[in-house]
Image (cartoon, helix red, strand yellow):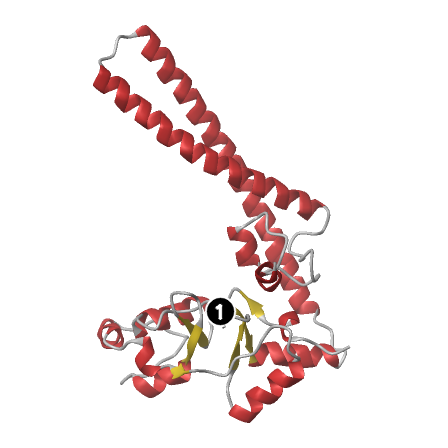
Amino acid sequence: MEAHVKAFMSGDPVSVDPDASALEAFERMWEHGIRHLPVCDAERRVVGVLSIEDMRATLPFPISLRRALAPGEREAAREWRVGEIMSHAPETLGPDQSLAEAAERMAEHRIGCLPIVDEGGRLAGLLSETDVLWALATSLGLRRTDERRGREADLAALVAELERERERIRARLERRQAGERELEQTDRELPLDSAERGADQTEIEAARTLDEMALRRLTAIDHALDRASQKLLGVCERCGGPIPVPRLRALPGATACIACARER
């Protein structure tokens, strides 16, 4: 069966704005340990790609992802815009195109990554040299035990993190509700002027709005933990592929990967 790009691409990749500074771009690369950044406009359409090699060719000092920039280097990097040093109108592919075509395109143009875009040219994922090598390893029947173990460990850590967050949210809601009951009791027992009563009511309404958001987060966390108990957390219900852990951390209730969510 022919392998497709979306099975091996990195979903929800880190990107940067063309008006951002080279300093901001480097800090994102350094923070995430990546060598390429898709450059997107306000509509998330891909307009370029910035690589660590582009940075090295432009900035007047050595660039390495193994060290942070010195104060003087940070000032120099701040003077450059991403749009000035990126590769414009880069090669792109759709998520349903073949992995063989992606590898051929990367080899032909000697590029280290391919932004994966939807029909509107909006960023849907990123396919790197490492992703292609993993695909090759899979096609050759090589085991990916270490990667699977790493993902299992990441998911286990996420579950523990969500359980702690659930307890924090529940405790905060209980404290907040107790405080509101106390405030209402005080309001009944002590006469307050209209200004004081209005301030109290404003505080209560603001807290209730926050409570509503917390309750929605709590529902999403409960759903995620239920899926984890069924060994389904992180598995896309539509294509069966993995849902990135950062997406699950932001949206615990997510049941679809980025590509499938966009298709929906």
**Residue depicted at 31% across the width and 75% down the height:** 22
Q: Quadrant of residue 130?
A: bottom right
Using the image, determine if residue 243 lies above or below residue 114: above
**Residue depicted at 37% across the width and 81% down the height:** 86
Rendering coords of residue 176 (x, y %) = 42, 26
Rendering coords of residue 21 (x, y %) = 29, 72
Q: Is residue 33 left or right of residue 248?
A: left
Q: Is residue 20 left or right of residue 212?
A: left
Q: Quadrant of residue 206?
A: top left
Along the viewing direction, whichever of 105 and 262 lies nearer the viewer: 262
Residue type marked 1? Arg
Q: Is residue 240 left or right of residue 52?
A: right
In the rendered image, which residue does mark 1 sit on? 122
Rendering coords of residue 13 (x, y %) = 50, 67
**Residue depicted at 37% across the width and 15% down the height:** 184
Question: Which quarter of the rendered picture does the N terminus lie within?
Answer: bottom right
Rendering coords of residue 236 (x, y %) = 66, 58
Are there few (<14), some (14-19), or many (20+) residues within 10 Å of tag 1?
A: some
For numbered disc 1, what is the local secondary structure? loop
Question: Which quarter of the rendered picture does the C terminus lie within?
Answer: bottom right
All told, the count of numbered labels is: 1
Using the image, determine if residue 212 lies above or below residue 232: above
Q: Is residue 107 left or right of residue 70?
A: right
Which residue extends farthest front?
120
